[in-house]
Amino acid sequence: MARENLWMGRRKPSNARPGGARPTRSGRAARATEPPLIQGDLFPRMGNDGRDIGLIIEVRRSTRRKKTIEAYRNGEKVIVSIPARMSQREANQVVDEMVKKILHDESTPTNTQLFERAQHLNKKYLDGKAVPVSVEWSSRMSRIWGACTIEDKTIRISDRLRDAPQYALDYLLIHELIHILIPGHGADFRALLERYPQLDRAEGYFEGRTHRPSGDFDQLFDE
């Protein structure tokens, strides 16, 4: 589908001009060359941690679009295509949401990266003894955060944790890795888990995210 790089102001119908005069060629050319809105207008330059994310947001209005919205990354730009008739207020909200989604998706580890992270943590804290066959996100885990199937050494992590801080995700990966070596949550399991230096902080994070009437903390991690 062809894309148009149109100005963000509202179009005025030609018959709205005084005397019903048609816009001049120079007037049409001026609007056609109107630069697209950039990041400072619709999306802050700063990321959540206050650093400059170095993005330019280019908004393209298209008369061919009626309801659909498209956003994608192109180098240092995020290009958002919206219907030409969309109001400025709606455009501001839509562009902000789309850019945030793209940045969030880019910051979320893929299954491959999750597996590589687990391998790194295994070597660092478990002497390389807990070798998983696979480590993947799961959308089916609504009651627990993670699980390890000991028989085939596969680990699944709830995709509800895609926005979790790294220290919390690392803790969960280590927790499940240990189950490749130790099935239960006894003293041997705890001794290995306590090798992780941010243990207390991570457990505090999960306790804060979990609302349950009763039950042991460890029950939230394993099937």
Image: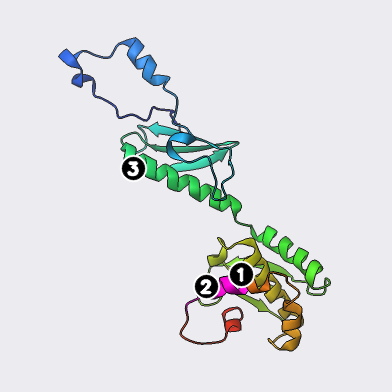
SS assignment at label 3:
helix
Query: Mark 1 belongs to which amino acid?
Result: Ile
Of the numbered discs 1 and 2, the one sitting upstream in the chain is 1
Residue at horizontal 71%, vertical 63%?
Answer: 115
Residue at horizontal 31%, vertical 38%?
Answer: 87
Q: Say left or right for 66 vs 56.
A: left
Could you say where residue 97 lies in the image, as x and y percent from the top left? 44, 48
Residue at horizontal 33%, vertical 37%?
Answer: 88
Main SS of the magenta part reads helix
The residue mark sitting in front, 1 or 2, is: 2
Question: In terms of depth relative to the viewer, which is nearer, 15 or 9?
Answer: 9
The residue where tag 1 is placed is 157
The residue mark sitting in front, 2 or 3, is: 2
Magenta-tinted stretch: 202-211
- Give me the disc on residue 90: 3
Say if the magenta span includes residue 139: no
Could you say where residue 40 lies in the image, as x and y percent from the top left? 47, 35
Query: Mark 3 belongs to which amino acid?
Result: Glu
Of the numbered discs 2 and 3, the one sitting upstream in the chain is 3
Q: Are marks 1 and 2 in contact (CB under 8 Å)?
A: no
Q: CA distance from mark 3 to mark 1?
A: 36 Å
User: How many marks are shown on the rendered structure?
Assistant: 3
Q: CA distance from mark 1 to mark 2?
A: 18 Å
Quarter of the image with the C terminus is bottom right
Query: Mark 2 belongs to which amino acid?
Result: Gly
Q: For the residue carrying disc 3, how many other residues have a C-alpha within 10 Å: few (<14), some (14-19), or many (20+)?
A: few
SS assignment at label 1:
strand
The residue where tag 2 is placed is 208
Q: Quadrant of residue 174?
A: bottom right
Residue at horizontal 76%, vertical 82%?
Answer: 191
Of the numbered discs 3 and 1, the one sitting upstream in the chain is 3
